[in-house]
Image (cartoon, rainbow, N blue to C red):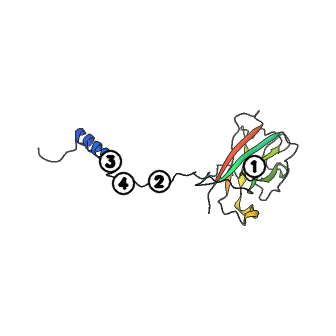
């Protein structure tokens, strides 16, 4: 039988030759930009969202801390002065109640923290809701970034903090 068949030996030797050529600079592979990927919106993150909740010092009586960072996708630069809104089902109210919602701004390092009542399980899971809503980031003329909703689940209902990271994608 005559003809050209690929054998295991041919594939291995071709692969070795290709790898050797690449190692010696015979092949050029385009460089990929290394960067921080944007945070995707989480399913259920927008549940019971109340657009434009006020910026507050604390939600309710406090005792639980929502904390996090806000950075720009790609270079990871911190984003100061960004408005982050949060709400949850707590010991003082349901996540649909207006008094369970509040917002804060990031500091010079892109960090935020807001105290609220202890989060309790809703639908079987202790979780919070947070949003960067470009439409309400008025300090930055509409924000310049895509809106992102988060619904992080706590490790335990006894946790007294919930920390998240927003990586925002420019529009």
Of circles 3 and 4, which is in front?
Answer: 3
**Quick one: which residue is furthest to the bottom in this view?**
141
Label for residue 24? 3
Closer-to-camera residue (96/86): 86
Q: Quadrant of the N terminus?
A: top left
Residue at horizontal 30 percent and vertical 48 percent from the top: 21
In terms of sequence position, does the residue under pointer 4 or pointer 1 come before the other? Answer: 4
Crowding around mark 2 (Cα neighbors within 10 Å: few <14, some 14 to 19, many 20+) is: few
Crowding around mark 3 (Cα neighbors within 10 Å: few <14, some 14 to 19, many 20+) is: few
Q: Give residue 143's quadrant in the image.
A: bottom right
Residue that carries the numbered disc 2 in the rendered image: 32
The answer for how far apart the CA atoms under marks 3 and 2 are is 20 Å
Tell me: residue 2, above or below residue 148: above
73 left or right of 135? Answer: left
145 left or right of 97? Answer: left
Residue that carries the numbered disc 1 in the rendered image: 112
The answer for how far apart the CA atoms under marks 1 and 3 are is 49 Å
Residue 168, percent from left and from top: 64, 55
**Quick one: which residue is furthest to the front in this view?**
24
């Amino acid at each position: 039988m005559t003809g050209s068949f690929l054998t295991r030996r041919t594939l291995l030797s071709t692969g070795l030759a290709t790898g050797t050529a690449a190692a010696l600079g015979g092949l050029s592979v385009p460089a990929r930009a290394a960067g921080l990927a944007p945070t995707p919106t989480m399913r259920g993150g927008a549940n019971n969202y109340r657009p434009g909740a006020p910026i507050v010092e604390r939600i309710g009586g406090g005792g639980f801390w929502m904390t996090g960072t806000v950075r720009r996708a790609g270079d990871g630069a911190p984003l100061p002065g960004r408005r982050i809104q949060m709400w949850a089902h707590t010991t003082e109210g349901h996540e649909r109640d207006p008094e369970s919602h509040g917002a804060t701004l990031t500091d010079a390092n892109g960090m935020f923290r807001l105290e609220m009542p202890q989060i309790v399980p809703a639908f079987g899971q202790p979780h919070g809701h947070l949003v960067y809503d470009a439409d309400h980031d008025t300090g930055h003329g509409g924000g310049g970034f895509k809106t992102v909703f988060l619904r992080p689940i706590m490790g335990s209902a006894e946790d007294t903090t919930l920390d998240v990271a927003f990586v925002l994608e420019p529009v």
